Image: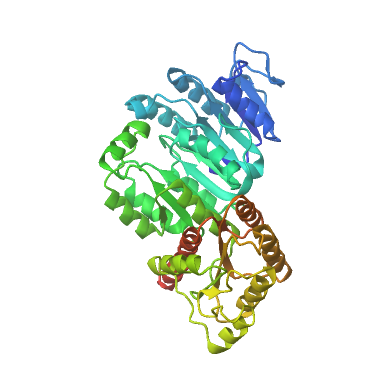
């Protein structure tokens, strides 16, 4: 049944509206505008046609099967709609409507869940902004129309934050495979959706904004997520860490925020990577989405600035990234890429005189060395080297020589440096505007490799 949410042949919008700005209008407009190729059925007893689609008074009047129903009617009308959806054979009801357990209306929420179970139907929501699955060209939200396609899945317990992140990911050129608003999690929850995404070939990493899990579900959450993290990395930002934040989370989605120490323990048991800011979560996800997992621990830093090299070295030590001690043979090779006053130790300092050729030679040597597992490329803006030229040369080298060593980049500078960062990211080399962010993202990939090795070494993973 969950699969129908991601690959429906038909979608009905119950509460579809002819009035621009209304949720029932925006959802239908986004389904159409994003190019969903299946059948679309607006349901509105007062309309004959909406946005070019024939409208129906009830879902029971739709002549064909309906896989997914998007429900936007008021809360008190939802039980009747759910009964009709069940009789129609709808597989998944996506209930955008709010006014359920998040405002204390637990009995109403329980009624719609009972109806769904009676008919073998699943519920996403209620109290959500809809969902996106880009491989099937589905944008069934009342958020922005455009969503960049990619291989990062985002599950959000907050509707407003999820909508905001739709725009934020576009601005930061982060591509999504899925964006799933879960709200009150009356039925489908974070763990079950993660289980599906763990086997989704279009998703490489799962990110989650979590306020809390339902009381009594902690053990099940850990058990399911332990299986998920064996297949895909999962990065979670947990809100409600403070006492007042926990109270706000409870009133927002009706979830039990609980002790942060309990969540921390659950994440560790499950193999979940914890992030503390939205930026951090996507920094980590970008690295997993673009690069292969590290094959080992030994990391080399290549830089044109001593200062950023030192900052990266500190970040590596603080985040448990092992910096390689290059052999004499490797140091001799690296010395050929720099002036006499450069350093072939680690960090490899090509000096401020470095041009494209110096970087390319050093990167080629690092890529070919059996001593090196991971590469951190650092750049400080200098008058002798345009960052955009360097970014293009790095991409050309990696593509021409099929370099598959885990690589991240930290570029520091102004507007042209930011353009170089965007260029690298577009070509699957995760790039960040500081050395610390690059090393931190790499550290989580190194940690995840260790986690997988430890789990797979156990008799029962």
Quadrant of the rendered structure where residue 368 is?
A: bottom right
Quadrant where the C terminus is found in the figure: bottom left
Q: Is residue 102 left or right of residue 410?
A: left
Q: Nearer the viewer, residue 308 or 112?
A: 308
Q: How is the image coloured?
A: rainbow
- In the picture shown, does residue 29 fall above or below 443? above
**Total numbered circles:** 0
Residue at 53% from the left image edge and 86% from the top image edge: 327
Residue 332 image offset from top left, x and y in percent: 59, 86
- In the picture shown, does residue 375 fall above or below 283? below
- In the picture shown, does residue 347 fall above or below 200? below
Residue 451 image offset from top left, x and y in percent: 43, 66
Residue at 40% from the left image edge and 71% from the top image edge: 458
Q: Is residue 1 visible?
A: no
Residue ranking furthest to the front: 383
Residue ranking furthest to the top: 46
Residue ranking furthest to the bottom: 328
Residue 157 image offset from top left, x and y in percent: 43, 39
Quadrant where the N terminus is found in the figure: top right
Q: Is residue 376 left or right of residue 448?
A: right
Quadrant of the rendered structure where residue 398 is?
A: bottom right
Residue 25 image offset from top left, x and y in percent: 60, 21
Q: Is residue 387 visible?
A: yes
């Amino acid at each position: 049944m969950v699969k129908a949410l991601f690959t429906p042949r038909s979608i009905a919008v119950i509460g579809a509206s002819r009035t621009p700005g209304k949720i029932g209008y925006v959802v239908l407009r986004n389904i159409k505008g994003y190019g969903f190729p299946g059948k679309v059925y607006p349901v509105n007893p007062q309309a004959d046609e909406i946005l070019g689609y024939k409208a129906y008074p009830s879902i029971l009047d739709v002549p064909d099967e309906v896989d997914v129903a998007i429900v936007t009617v008021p809360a008190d009308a939802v039980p009747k709609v759910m009964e009709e959806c069940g009789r129609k054979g709808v597989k998944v009801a996506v209930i955008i409507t709010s006014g359920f357990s998040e405002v204390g209306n637990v009995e109403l929420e329980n009624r719609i869940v009972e109806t769904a179970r009676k008919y073998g139907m699943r519920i996403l929501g209620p109290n959500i902004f809809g969902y996106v699955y880009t491989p099937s060209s589905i944008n069934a939200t009342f958020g922005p129309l455009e969503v960049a396609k990619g291989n990062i899945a985002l599950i959000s317990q907050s509707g407003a934050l999820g909508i905001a992140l739709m725009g934020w990911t576009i601005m930061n050129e982060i591509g999504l495979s899925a964006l799933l608003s879960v709200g009150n999690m009356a039925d489908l929850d974070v763990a079950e959706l993660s289980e599906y995404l763990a086997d989704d070939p279009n998703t490489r990493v799962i990110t989650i904004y979590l306020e809390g899990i339902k009381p009594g579900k902690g053990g099940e959450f850990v058990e399911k997520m332990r299986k998920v993290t064996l297949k895909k990395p999962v990065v979670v930002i947990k809100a409600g860490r403070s006492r007042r934040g926990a109270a706000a989370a409870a009133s927002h989605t009706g979830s039990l925020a609980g002790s942060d120490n309990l969540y921390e323990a659950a994440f560790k048991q499950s193999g979940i990577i914890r992030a503390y800011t939205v930026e951090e979560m996507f920094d980590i996800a970008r690295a997993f989405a673009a690069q292969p997992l590290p094959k080992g621990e030994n990391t080399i830093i290549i830089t044109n600035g001593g200062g950023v090299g030192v900052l990266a070295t500190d970040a590596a030590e603080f985040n448990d990234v092992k910096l390689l001690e290059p052999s004499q043979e490797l140091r001799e090779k690296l010395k050929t890429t720099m002036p006499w006053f450069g350093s072939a130790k680690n960090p490899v300092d090509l000096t401020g005189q470095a041009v494209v050729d110096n970087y390319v030679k050093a990167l080629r040597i690092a890529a070919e060395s059996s001593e090196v597992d991971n590469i951190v490329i650092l750049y400080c803006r200098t008058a002798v080297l345009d960052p955009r030229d360097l970014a293009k040369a790095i991409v050309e080298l990696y593509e021409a020589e099929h370099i598959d060593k885990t690589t991240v980049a930290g570029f520091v500078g102004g507007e042209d440096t930011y353009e170089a960062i965007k260029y690298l990211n577009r070509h699957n080399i995760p790039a960040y505007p500081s050395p610390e962010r690059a090393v931190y993202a790499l550290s989580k990939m190194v940690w995840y490799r260790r986690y997988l090795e430890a789990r797979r070494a156990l008799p029962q993973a």
